[in-house]
């Protein structure tokens, strides 16, 4: 694989920008040929959207496994084929074409029934989804992201739509999302919509599809509870948004003839998803989450304030913004959102790539200051030191939330350099130091 990557790098460097689309397409075809078009031997389900893809895949995989199926997974968190599970260390939610086809081939050789994978707009832009026979597609939600790469929001949405054009078996769509009609309007043998009662179908009531409706949704420090057709469900993950992720998985289950009681058992058994509203400590209460978009950050903060912060407690928020020239527009917005919800803010370094990390921090700080933030505001370049500060500031009734890294195993620096990183482990290490020093 290393030799292939070197060859690809050299070839790509000789290709003009205008011809890169054709290069990526041919590379996708070459990868599929190399591994014998393995997706033809699998039932492949692609999950796309701005937020929630990894957790939705965890729910889908759990439901299908509970029903007795052998399932392979490709997500930003892991590569899983049968009993073989590896952390995704590529830095890409959707790896390159040869890597994707290789994992599909492993799943086929292992005689997996299903392959569930994340499909990103950047991956689609580079034709990484080509020559994969998608049986079904799942849409979680859509908010502005990768705008600088795609040019505008319409192009970003259109990239996501390509997955649904490729999947002819079934389409599953979050009907509460304002972009749902674009996805529901595409042809498929079967269509399913999901959402909360009172919202689901309001904007898309003329689009024919089966509807899975979440009823009596309640959230608390134990997770969330809801009903589907009178059947009670328990989600052990924090946040109302995880009810949406569970509803998407229930739709997949219904499309595959899996019974509701099987879904109920599978969803209740998921106690944690690495780096997704994952509890890193009970005393003090500390969570790590991958959230790095304005929409995701807003939902994470609002959820923790409502369900976890004790009486008189505050949110202690550690955040940054990824660099590499990516989506600079959102950095001040992230600061504004933190100012709205947080009692203490620590702004720190987060995957700067080739950008000056101080400039990134300054842009996030500008948003918080301009929003009139009146609490404690700290700039700490060293992320480990920033985590230590967050822990020091977190009282008994408070909640610390560290966003942006989640379960990512690396921090990405200039000129392709990367250093190992495990946010949850670092929380444990710094907490032990603080306890030993007291």
Image (cartoon, helix red, strand yellow):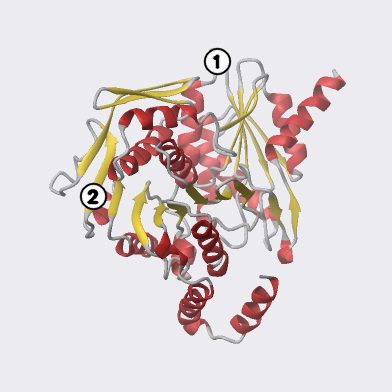
Above or below, 229 relative to 38: above
In the rendered structure, the answer to whether residue 128 lies left or right of residue 246 reads right
285 and 211: which is toward the camera: 211
Q: Secondary structure at mark 2?
A: strand
Q: Secondary structure at mark 1?
A: loop
Q: Quadrant of residue 263?
A: top left
Q: Which residue is mark 1?
A: 310
Quarter of the image that includes the C terminus: top right
Residue 321, image x and y in percent? 60, 49
Residue 55 shows up from this direction: yes
In the rendered structure, the answer to whether residue 183 lies left or right of residue 28 reads left
Residue 30, image x and y in percent? 51, 78
Residue ID at (60%, 15%):
397
Q: Of discs 1 and 2, which sits in the foreground?
A: 2
Q: Considering only order in the chain, which callout, 2 or 1, is on the residue closer to the N terminus?
A: 2
Q: Which residue is mark 2?
A: 191
In the rendered structure, the answer to whether residue 169 lies left or right of residue 263 reads left
Quarter of the image that includes the N terminus: bottom right
Residue 55, image x and y in percent? 48, 41
Q: Residue furthest top?
A: 311
Residue ID at (47%, 83%):
18
Residue 174 shows up from this direction: no
Q: Residue furthest left?
A: 206
121 and 337: which is toward the camera: 121
Label 1 Cα crowd, 10 Å radius (few <14 / some 14-19 / many 20+): some
Residue 153, image x and y in percent? 38, 60
Residue ID at (24%, 30%):
197
Residue ID at (42%, 53%):
144
| Label 1, label 2: how far apart the Cα atoms are | 42 Å
């Amino acid at each position: 694989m290393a030799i292939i990557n070197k060859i690809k790098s050299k070839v790509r460097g000789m290709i003009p920008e205008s011809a890169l689309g054709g290069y990526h397409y041919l590379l996708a075809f070459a990868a599929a040929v190399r591994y014998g078009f393995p997706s033809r031997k699998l039932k492949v389900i692609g999950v796309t959207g701005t937020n929630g893809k990894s957790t939705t895949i965890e729910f889908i995989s759990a439901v299908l496994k509970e029903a007795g199926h052998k399932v392979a997974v490709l997500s930003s968190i892991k590569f899983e084929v049968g009993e073989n599970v590896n952390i995704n260390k590529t830095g890409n939610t959707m790896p390159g074409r040869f890597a994707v086809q290789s994992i599909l081939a492993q799943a086929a050789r292992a005689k997996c029934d299903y392959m569930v994978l994340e499909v990103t707009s950047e991956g689609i832009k580079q034709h990484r989804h080509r020559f994969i026979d998608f049986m079904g597609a799942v849409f979680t939600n859509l908010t502005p992201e990768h705008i600088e790469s795609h040019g505008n929001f319409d192009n970003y949405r259109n990239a996501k739509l390509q997955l649904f054009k490729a999947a002819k078996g079934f389409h599953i769509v979050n009907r509460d999302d304002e972009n749902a009609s674009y996805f529901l309007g595409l042809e498929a043998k079967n269509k399913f919509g999901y959402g909360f009662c009172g919202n689901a179908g309001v904007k898309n009531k003329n689009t024919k599809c089966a509807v899975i409706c979440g009823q009596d949704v309640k959230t608390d420090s134990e997770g969330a509870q809801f009903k589907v057709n009178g059947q009670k469900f328990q989600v052990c993950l924090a946040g109302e948004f995880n009810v949406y992720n569970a509803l998407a998985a229930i739709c997949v289950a219904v499309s595959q003839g899996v019974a509701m009681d099987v879904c109920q058992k599978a969803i209740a058994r998921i106690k944690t998803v690495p780096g997704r509203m994952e509890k890193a400590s009970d005393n003090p209460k500390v969570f790590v989450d991958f959230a790095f978009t304005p929409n995701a950050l807003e939902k994470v903060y609002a959820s923790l304030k409502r369900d976890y912060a004790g009486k008189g407690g505050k949110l202690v928020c550690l955040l940054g913004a990824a660099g590499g020239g990516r989506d600079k527009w959102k950095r001040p917005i992230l600061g504004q959102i933190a100012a709205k919800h947080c009692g203490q803010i620590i702004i720190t370094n987060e995957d700067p790539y080739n950008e000056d990390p101080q400039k990134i921090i300054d842009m996030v700080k500008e948003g918080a200051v301009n929003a009139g933030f009146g609490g404690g505001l700290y700039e700490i370049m060293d992320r480990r030191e920033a985590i230590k500060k967050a822990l020091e500031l977190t009282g008994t009734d408070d909640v610390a939330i560290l966003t942006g890294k989640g379960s990512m195993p690396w921090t990405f620096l200039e000129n392709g350099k990367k250093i190992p990183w495990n946010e949850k482990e670092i929380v444990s290490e710094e907490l032990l130091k603080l306890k030993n020093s007291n």
